[in-house]
Amino acid sequence: MIKNGFLTFCFSFIPGAGQMYQGYMKRGLSQVTAFVLLIALGAGLFGPIAVFAAVVYMYSFFDSLNLRSQLKMGICPPDEYQFNLDELKGLARLAMQRHNLVGWGLVLLGVWGLYSNFIYPWVWDLADIFGYDNPVVNAVRSLINNLPTLAVSVIFVYAGVRLIRGSGPKKGGELPQDLEDDFTEYKGE
């Protein structure tokens, strides 16, 4: 049954509510859960993650309107969760294969948390104690304020150098074992 267009529009402003109003409970529940989790993470330790809540919000808004137009055309998509558990198993498998990448991601998140919740406020407390015109405090405060930019710049330079150098054949002209298995010699026609 097609629901009221105006109410669908009004419910679309709440992530997941437009889908639930049209009877798609699993779809709406997964969208509201993703939105609330991103807001909670953004309000806590990882503020920049809250930007992704805006993406979920916009997706949910347009998805509910698109769902209504599909229902009007007689197309009834299945009510499924947006994030399938089988996909999460695949992500877990990828994380196990690329544990170094996941490890570095966790280290970066931890360093960001330490910086934003400990180091940065501590420097401002020092400025309160020793005065804002103290040259040592100003130098430390300037360094701490520019630390994220410095870190990102160093990471970009390192990544650029790694890309330029490449990971060509090892000394002796031999291919790495995983590439050697896929290699087939061209024999011409």
Image (tube, rainbow, N blue to C red):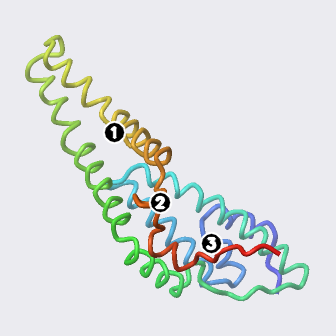
Q: Quadrant of residue 188?
A: bottom right
Q: Are marks 3 and 1 in contact (CB under 8 Å)?
A: no
Real-space CA distance between mark 3 and mark 1, rounded to the nearest whole angstrom: 41 Å
Q: Earlier in the sequence, mark 1 or mark 2?
A: 1
Side of 48 where 1 appears, left or right: right
Real-space CA distance between mark 1 and mark 2, rounded to the nearest whole angstrom: 30 Å
Q: Earlier in the sequence, mark 2 or mark 3?
A: 3
Q: Residue at x 83, y 75 (%)?
A: 189
Dot 2 amino acid type = Pro
Q: Which residue is mark 2?
A: 169
Dot 1 amino acid type = Ala
Measured from the top left, where is residue 12 in percent x and y? 68, 65
Q: Which label lies toward us, 1 or 2?
A: 2
Residue sitting nearer the eye, 136 or 27: 136
Per the rendering, the mark at residue 17 is 3
Q: Are marks 2 and 3 in contact (CB under 8 Å)?
A: no
Q: Which label lies toward us, 2 or 3?
A: 2
Measured from the top left, where is residue 44 in percent x and y? 32, 55
Q: Earlier in the sequence, mark 3 or mark 1?
A: 3
Q: Quadrant of residue 161?
A: top left
Q: Which SS class for mark 3? A: helix
Residue sitting nearer the eye, 22 or 35: 35
Measured from the top left, where is residue 166 in percent x and y? 48, 51
Residue sitting nearer the eye, 159 or 116: 159
Side of 95 where 54 appears, left or right: right
Q: Which SS class for mark 1? A: helix
Q: Quadrant of residue 61?
A: bottom right
